[in-house]
Amino acid sequence: MLRFKKYIFFFALAFIFFAALVVRIYQLNTIPVGMTDDELRVVVSAYNLWHTGRDLKGVTLPFSFVLNDYSFTPVSIYLTAPFVGLAGLSPLAARLPFALAGTAVVILTYLTGKRLFGSRMIGFFAAFVMTWNVWAIQLSRMAYEAVFALLFYLWGTYIFLGDWKKHPIRSITYAMCLFFLAFNSYNAMKVLLFPVVLILVWYKRKELFRNYRSVAVIGGFFAATIGLFLYYSVVQGASAHGGAITIFQDSAAAAQAVELKRRASSAPEFLKVLYHNKVTYYAGQVVHHYLYTFSPDYLFLSQEASGIYSLWSRGNLYLIELPLLLLGIFAVWRRNKEIFPLVIAMLLVAPLPSAIGPAPLTYATRSSFMLPWFALFIAVGLYDWIIAISKRYARYAVIIVIGILYALAICGYLRQYYFEWPRYSAKSYAWDMKEIVQFIQSDRASADRFLVANTGDTFFLHYAFYTGLDPRVLQRAYEGESVLNSLDGIEVLPACLTPIEQDPRLHIDKRTVYIARADCHSIAADRVIYLPDGLPAWNIYGIPLEVVPHP
């Protein structure tokens, strides 16, 4: 009987892992409906690296990939390179390594739960939560660096929490190597390295201080990691970032806010200076951003404002998980006074990248290290609730009710993700860029020159991705230039060609096609490209009249 139960458990566990993989790769080639600029910076860099051994600027095997004044970390690009290098450029090949990393996070959540609480069922419930979690699925289905940082931070934590009796130095070395990869996976989550390792050192302090070589290994890896980052910041611009990556970089906003508050106050000057200054401004913003990541609105109701990560009226966790989460926090605190400080400390430091990040309040990617700890608390709450019921039929009834509520929540999310989100997220995922590239390719024979207005500085990354442009051609175009303006008979204009009321056809040659945002000109276009939600995206001038019907 015990053997039969064991087989049932492993079958259920294998099914959970398989479901995690399927939900992360199903329709991955078509949903999300396009590729964002940040995704393409990673993917096209990986493609170029595989075929030429260099980045787009011509640097051989770089540690930092700087493109359009943004530095991208090496881990995700090097891990993506074999996929797009061997399979070619497509959304599926580009996002597959991230989907696999997301599946690995589910497996590691199971292993971490089992190791921490000594219970396969708690690990199983945690894996179940991560498999169907909105946040985890969204994170795994796009080519964003955060999922690799989450994977390596969690993996390093799992190794660090292991038994060190036989090979303490080897275990710590493995863990610190994984933390090194985590640090170099996503810029925003670099700030987690020190607090995460410090928490683990505190938790393992008895074993650590019996063997001072272990402390030396940790200190050596810290020095090497930070030193290497500082070196490549000078040599290859590893710390470059075109926008503000932390709130402290936006000094103009801070100065303006402080000035407005001082003007609005009638207090004596010394009180104005004491209470309204950059220190109090930054402190208030950091606390506000930090607390927002724990707010019911962010967790259970509406996620964040960005259409890249968020679904309308959908939180990062399901509402059914709120009572389970609260019950789990209480259960861990009541039953295990040693593990509770560890798990709660990990949860509390996880939002630090969001706390110091610029507006908007947070990105799901920045605070993603919260995910496994939420899953563990929810799993303990679910497990504790079930075992607390002594009567067998009552326990079955609770399991059935929870199963039905979870099924309704999961099906509601999948319905929204596959049938509604592709329409209203099209603009966030640059679906219109894909349409423009396909239009240019189909109209090549009838035009010598294409002018494209108001596309930003990443249009040629979209062009290279959807056309499979020779990476050497793109590399030659990008070398020595921070912004690419022309390539392959296409020229990108920084603004609309003419004022809104003028006909742009009067300013282009006969064999030139002009493509502009729909709000660039009030003059009727020769062709209109619409977004999936029916809104016009592009006006095209210079070809015979043809209006694309609404989808």
Image (spheres, rainbow, N blue to C red):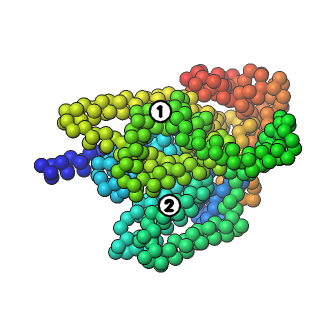
Amino acid type for the residue under numbered disc 2: Ile
Q: Residue at 71% across / 67% down in the picture?
A: 234
The secondary structure type at the circle numbered 2 is: helix
Q: Quadrant of residue 222?
A: bottom right
User: Circle 1 is placed at which residue position?
Assistant: 417
Amino acid type for the residue under numbered disc 1: Tyr
Q: Residue at 42% across / 29% down in the picture?
A: 412
Examine the rendered structure and indicate whether residue 303 appears above or below residue 479.
above
Residue 536, position in %: x, y? 66, 25
The secondary structure type at the circle numbered 1 is: helix
Q: Is residue 448 left or right of residue 28?
A: right
Q: Residue at 76% across / 29% down in the picture?
A: 520
Looking at this view, name the residue that lies furthest to the left: 1
- Characterize the local packing of mark 2: few (<14), some (14-19) or many (20 or more) Cα atoms within 10 angstroms: some
State the residue in front, 315 or 414.
Answer: 315
Could one spot residue 417 in this view of the protein?
A: yes
How far apart are the two marked residues, 1 and 2, measured between alpha carbons? 37 Å
State the residue in front, 416 or 33.
Answer: 416
State the residue in front, 425 or 403.
Answer: 403
Q: Is residue 501 left or right of residue 532?
A: right
